[in-house]
Image (cartoon, rainbow, N blue to C red):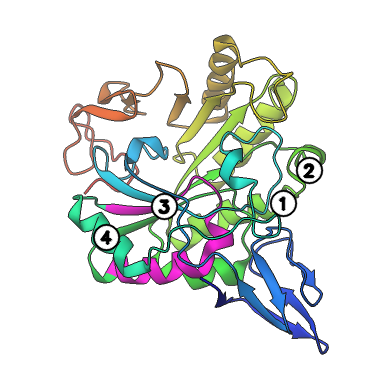
Amino acid sequence: MIKEARLWEKQGEQKVHCFLCAHECKIAESKFGICGVRQNIQGTLQTMIYADVVAANIDPIEKKPLYHFLPGSLSFSIATVGCNFKCGFCQNWQISQTSTKDGYSPRREVPPAAVVEEAQKNKCASISYTYTEPTIFFEYAYDTARLAHEAGLYNIFVTNGYMTWPALEMIRPYLDAANVDLKSFSDDAYRKNCKARLQPVLDTIAAMKSLGVWVEVTTLVIPGENDSDDELKRITAFLAGVDPMIPWHISRFHPDYEFTDHKATPLTTLHKAKEIGQQAGLAHIYLGNVPEGTDTFCYRCRHQIIQRRYMGLNNNQLKDGRCPHCGAVIAGVWS
């Protein structure tokens, strides 16, 4: 469905300025923004993918990954095509790097009310806007999120964090949690590998925390790209400076898309990253895409308090968000 976009302004007769994401595209008549799904049509910015669902699944919340937000619950997960990043290591490139600009045509219209209905029917506690980049289907996510809150459901963004303050401020009343990808701590690497910049991502992580959105962060560790001790120290120092209770997910890379010449991340590298994060003061660090390192331990007494299996929950010992052994408050949204 084609629908007028939000967060844009006219610039002259036919040009428009989109300020939904940090690219802040200036788009001439008939042209698209970097995302490839927002088009200037006769001086009006239109989203070309409203309610055009390319993926819809019932996922465990742990798959997002969110480990400190409603553990053991289900999340109805949706996506449209498109992304405002061009990551050569993207693991969902078949849908994220497809766009209206490149000839994609809508396939399945699922209005916001139908998404909420499906979530309720399948006993999901939340709706996740995920797989591609929720910022670029903002209008659809926003309308769905409003209805979801009215129905008592939570809303989650799994995002690259490249949104503007006006976009974050607009979605905030309906956004409960986010997992933000922090792909590197090098602006040069962001420009080379993602065709984007680092600072807006850092700003989004800090802004979400200040606005009360529950935040977890994921870093895909890629050999030869972002796995040096210096890089990992800078990532973890930043996160600890925002809030040492932010859960940090360190994910194993596997060769894909344009990065097939890179090797998979050695397990030893993930362990090194975890150790660096602990030295920086991060309380909760998890390994991803490997069959270990997913359990939660109390940061104070080090007892295991949540045991997970692959993308799911085995046992949760928390009592009203507190460690049952020493009473420490464990940061998160538990019920």
Q: Name the residue under label 3.
A: 78
Q: In this view, does 112 lie above or below 124?
A: below
Residue under the point 63% across and 68% down: 20
Q: Which of marks 1 and 2 is nearer the N terminus?
A: 2
Disc 2 or disc 3, which is closer to the eye? 3
Name the element at disc 1. Answer: helix
Q: Which amino acid does label 2 sit on?
A: Asp
Q: Circle 2: is it few (<14), some (14-19), or many (20+) Cα within 10 Å? A: few
Q: Residue 299 in the image: x percent, y percent?
A: 37, 29
15 or 241: which is nearer to us?
15
Q: Give the range drawn in magenta.
A: 126-149
Q: What residue type is labelled 4?
A: Leu
Name the element at disc 2. Answer: helix
Q: Do the residues labelled 2 and 3 touch (CB within 8 Å)?
A: no
Q: Earlier in the sequence, mark 2 or mark 3?
A: 3
Q: Are marks 1 and 2 in contact (CB under 8 Å)?
A: yes
Q: Which of marks 1 and 4 is nearer the N terminus?
A: 4
Q: Earlier in the sequence, mark 4 or mark 2?
A: 4
Residue under the point 40% across and 16% down: 292
Q: Mark 1 points at which residue?
A: 199
Q: Name the residue under label 2.
A: 187
Q: What residue type is labelled 1?
A: Gln
Q: Do the residues labelled 1 and 4 touch (CB within 8 Å)?
A: no
Q: Is residue 234 above or below residue 228?
A: below
* Main SS category, magenta section: helix
Q: Name the residue under label 4.
A: 153
Q: In this view, does 289 lie to the left or right of 70?
A: right
Q: Distance between the residues labelled 1 and 3?
A: 27 Å
